[in-house]
Image (cartoon, grey):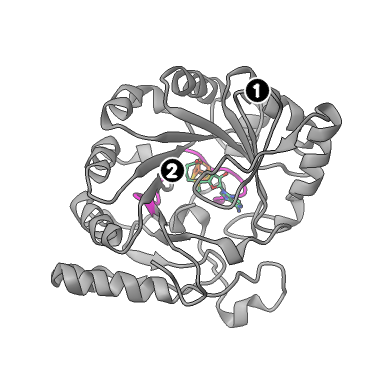
Amino acid sequence: MVDKYGRTIEYMRVSVTDRCDLRCRYCMPPEGCEKVPMSSILTYEQIVRICRVSADLGISRIKITGGEPFARLGCTGLIRDIKGLPGIEQVTVTTNGQTLENHIEELKAAGVDGINISLDTLDPGRFAYITGRGVLEKTLRAVELAAGSGIKTKINSLIMKGFNEDEITALAGFAFSRGIDARFIEMMPVGAADAGRGMSNETVLAVLKEKWPELVPDESIHGNGPAVYYKRPGERGAIGLISAMHGKFCEECNRVRLTSQGEIKPCLCYDTGTDIRPFLSESDDRLREAVRDAILEKPEAHCFDSMNDAGGHAEHRLMSQIGG
Ligand code: SAM
Ligand code: SF4
């Protein structure tokens, strides 16, 4: 559907849980956070129903996220069910990869269209530090399995000053050597993030171009969002830059989020959203109307770059609670 500002909204990030087995420093405090009781979390049936009425409105692509989606039992079954909905063209998932090995076969059978794996560093010590408790080997294995499965695989990396800025080309080279995409995501001032440490993708690109001057923009590649892609001639994998901060892309933003508690959240920057749980006891028509109204609340732009605290409505929840 087209929103108030003429943008076509076709992509929904669906969070299935606020739980996570890791504690990435920019996402969650080390002690974790208060868990939402399972009774407040949408059931899979409710999620499928919301996706079904959203598909009627033109949402054709769904990303399953969290928290860590595989921290919730049965997530692959949900993917299979959403894949079967009329109007849904693509279902992808984003994961920290720590338990992917246990799910890859079911994911293939479910027909998942893509797997994004978060990987900020190739150094085991740094990985343990940034994730709080993760084991690099498990995520590397997840990348190998996903890449070898034939499912479109991407790694997602956040580059932080003084932490992994010396690994930009190593991460890209790691992806290139496996024929998969490397995406660099600018850190946003959400949750536990110290956004001052985030590195601009302009700098990331400059570093990549110094190593590979032959990198050229590739407009033929489209993910679900406004990533800008670069390729080396003859290379299977590409570089994607998602520059929410320094390359503000609000004019082309095509997404909304569904939190695990049933809130449609139109923009990450603000604490605003619509609780659509009350409409789950109503007809499909009424529920669809509620989703439509929620999407129409999407603001024109984020204001991460200004210091006005979003007019008193800045988002203070963690990324894992909202659904990253
Ligand atoms: N647990 C899964 C994972 O790590 O991929 C899915 C949820 S996680 C919140 C989704 C993505 O959000 C990850 O790639 C993570 O790096 C990113 N993320 C978390 N906090 C962020 C922040 N403050 N700014 C930008 N990206 C962030
Ligand atoms: Fe968990 Fe993903 Fe957040 Fe890391 S980024 S703490 S893996 S939800």
| Range covered by the magenta-colored residues | 14-29
- Viewer-proximal residue among 202 and 281: 202
Q: Residue at x 51, y 66 (%)?
A: 267
> Pointer 1: residues within 10 angstroms few (<14), some, or many (20+)?
few
Question: Distance of mark 1 from mark 2, alpha carbons?
Answer: 34 Å
Numbered disc 2: secondary structure: loop
Instruction: Please state which amino acid type lies under the numbered disc 2.
Output: Cys
Residue 65 visible? The answer is yes
Residue 313, horizontal then vertical, whole percent = 55, 78
Q: Is residue 34 magenta?
A: no
The residue beneath circle 2 is: 20
**Would residue 306 be found to the left or right of residue 2 on screen?**
right
The answer to whether 152 is drawn above or below residue 25 in the figure is above
Residue 303, horizontal then vertical, whole percent = 65, 71
Q: Residue at x 25, y 42 (%)?
A: 78
Residue 162 visible? The answer is no
Residue 193, horizontal then vertical, whole percent = 64, 54
Q: Earlier in the sequence, mark 1 or mark 2?
A: 2
- Viewer-proximal residue among 5 and 320: 5
Q: Residue at x 30, y 61 (%)?
A: 54
The answer to whether 100 is drawn above or below residue 220 in the figure is above
Residue 235's tag is 1
Report the quarter where the N terminus lies. Answer: bottom left
Numbered disc 1: secondary structure: loop
Tag in front: 1 or 2: 1
Instruction: Please state which amino acid type lies under the numbered disc 1.
Output: Glu
Q: Quadrant of residue 159?
A: top right
The answer to whether 279 is drawn above or below residue 222 in the figure is below
Magenta segment's dominant SS is loop
Q: Is mark 2 within 8 Å of ligand 2?
A: yes
